[in-house]
Image: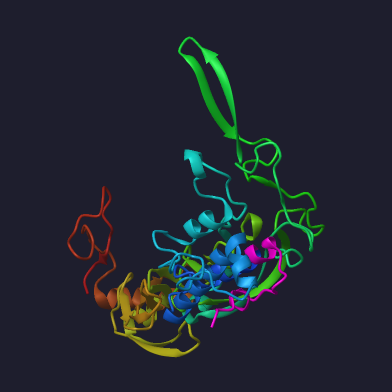
Amino acid sequence: MARDYYATLGVAREATPEQIKRAYRKLARELHPDVNPDEAAQERFREVTTAYEVLSDPKKRQVVDLGGDPLSNGGGAGGGMGDPFAGFGGLGDIMDAFFGGGAAGGGGRGPRSRVQPGSDALLRLELTLEDCASGVNRDITVDTAVLCDSCDGGGSRVGSAPSTCDTCGGRGEVQSVQRSFLGQVMTSRPCPVCRGFGEVITDPCQQCGGDGRVRARRTITVKIPAGVGDGMRVRLAGEGEVGPGGGPAGDLFVEVEELPHERFTRDGADLHCTVELPMTAAALGTVLVLETLDGGQEELTVEPGTQPGTEHVLTGRGLPKLRSNGKVSGHGDLHVHLDVVVPTRLDDSQSDLLRQLAVLRGEEQPEPTVTANGNGNRHGLFSRFRSFGHR
């Protein structure tokens, strides 16, 4: 039984060549192995490619219309055609070969395809530190070129089709001969009438003006994974600009802009915060209740005699660690830096109490002990005074 090539492409038997081309172009963008690696899709792509090869050839199409199969043994095709896209590379090569982008006969470059891939788009999204820590789904509004739904990317008004360019005869280029001292020199350049396409849209689509795409504003949802940081980008495949002639869309990249936080600063997956501690609490010791980024609470024990600049590390209380594959691998730490605050204003009774303490500790006239810093390393030109008197 002869194969139904029209049904394979999803077109009527009276479909025009332009409608057949448009149907194949739409299916090829969906089923090509570069886009859809599924084995069933690849087999389906072979079938629609074979159907287009048959129906785009007037002689083979005539055999089909007479009830035969030009690819069957003895059906007029001289045997099977083998792999319908053997020797082609990616989707662009397939489009070029079938729609005029490849080399023309006779060694010329031939007409170029109207179908061109679209460009990528970039959108910046402001997120709080809490959003970056937990991940968030956010609706965003984008303004990009989309496929014209009136002509389906073809560029011509419904019911019409492009015509062959009279200037270049469909070759997409014109040649000129110039005389020089070396003899005659022949040069080729893109046809100025059809701009190298080999055909002219005589009756363009009113909606897109023949470009095959229109600009539209739409809202899409982007999923931001937990652990993202400032400058990171989330890729949304196929959500960018649709290409000229209804070509495949580029990608949309959403770049994260992390807003400053009032309490925490970030270093990768680690968080840092500074807690001001009264001098008396540092000397006597205390227990601090800290609010973490996720809204929880952590108790921090401050030992008696805690010094300025003391750091406490709360393990695993930082941000999720985001790996390159988008998976979370553990969490960072929360670094709490203690800043001992010395009072600047004392009333008489407070001053008397401190003087009594100084007498008890023998610190009425302290001898300053100069050190580089607390761990014995040099700290630039000026050393920091870290200890005063006796302890």
Residue 271 rendering spot, x and y as whole percentages: 40, 74
Tell me if 226 is positioned left or right of 192 in this view: left
- Quarter of the figure that contains the N terminus: bottom right
In this orientation, does residue 346 appear? no
Q: Quadrant of residue 118?
A: bottom right
Picture quadrant of residue 188: top right
Q: Residue at x 47, y 70 (%)?
A: 74
Q: Is the image coloured rainbow, by chain, by secondary structure, or in one colour?
A: rainbow
State the residue in front, 78 or 308.
Answer: 78
Residue lying farthest to the top in this orientation: 181
Q: Residue at x 70, y 70 (%)?
A: 218
Nearest the eye: 197 or 258: 197
Q: Quadrant of residue 301?
A: bottom left
Q: Nearer the viewer, residue 160 or 381?
A: 160
Residues rendered magenta in the picture: 1-21
Q: In the image, is 342 to the left or to the right of 149?
A: left
The percent position of residue 153, horizontal first and vertical second, equals 68, 61
